Image (tube, rainbow, N blue to C red):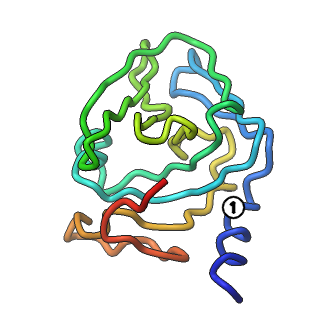
């Protein structure tokens, strides 16, 4: 099976509309299009922000993502030099999505916020070079030492 077919197979598990929200339910979202990518990010920033060894997210076109509810944002500069904005529920603090100023056409939604997380299948591990030493990155179709171009 070709790499492209494997990637499409993983992403096809998530059929729109894709819905989710925060822990307290104040923030909800709907994605009207299928993801274009999915990943486990092992970068030190994601580790620190999540309190875990990696975060899992899927990328959807920004124009298909609708969010309701009160949010707050945290801004930081990524290794790429672009600002990354992570959006949280203003009430419970759950991280809902992140967006890079270098790829504003995409919204990266955290898989843990899915109403049905069983449909999430990561295509890749990114920042494997920064993976926590106490875990083996989950099996995926492709691994990247850093972040590939969007």
Q: Residue at x 67, y 67 (%)?
A: 10
The image shows residue 126 at horizontal and vertical percentages of 38, 63
Residue 84: image quadrant is top left
Q: In this orientation, which residue lies closer to the viewer: 121 or 75? A: 75
Q: Which residue is mark 1?
A: 11
The image shows residue 63 at horizontal and vertical percentages of 68, 30
Q: Secondary structure at mark 1?
A: helix
Left of 41 or right of it: where is 15? right
Q: In this orientation, which residue lies closer to the viewer: 137 or 41? A: 41
Q: How many marks?
A: 1
70, above or below 89, in the image? above
Q: In this orientation, which residue lies closer to the viewer: 82 or 14? A: 82
52, above or below 3, in the image? above
Q: In this orientation, which residue lies closer to the viewer: 143 or 122? A: 143
Residue 146: image quadrant is bottom left
The image shows residue 102 at horizontal and vertical percentages of 41, 40
State the residue lying farthest toward the bottom.
1
The image shows residue 1 at horizontal and vertical percentages of 71, 89
Q: Residue at x 25, y 42 (%)?
A: 81
Residue 11: image quadrant is bottom right
Left of 64 or right of it: where is 90? left
**Dot 1: within a 10 Å radius of its alpha carbon, few (fewer than 14), some, or many (20 or more) residues?**
many
Q: Residue at x 40, y 15 (%)?
A: 72
70, above or below 81, in the image? above
Q: Residue at x 28, y 55 (%)?
A: 43
């Amino acid at each position: 099976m070709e790499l492209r077919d494997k990637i499409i197979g993983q992403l096809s598990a998530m059929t729109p509309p894709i819905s989710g929200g925060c822990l307290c339910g104040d923030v909800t979202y709907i994605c009207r299009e299928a993801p274009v990518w999915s990943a486990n990010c092992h970068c030190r920033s994601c580790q620190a922000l999540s309190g875990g060894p990696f975060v899992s997210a899927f990328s959807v076109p920004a124009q298909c993502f609708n969010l309701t509810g009160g949010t707050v944002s945290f801004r930081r500069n990524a290794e790429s030099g672009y600002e990354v904005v992570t959006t949280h529920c203003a009430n419970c603090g759950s991280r809902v999505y992140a967006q890079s100023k270098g790829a504003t056409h995409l919204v990266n939604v955290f898989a843990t916020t899915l109403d049905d997380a069983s449909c999430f299948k990561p295509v890749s591990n990114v920042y494997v070079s920064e993976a926590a030493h106490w875990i083996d990155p989950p099996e995926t179709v492709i691994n990247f030492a850093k972040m590939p171009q969007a």
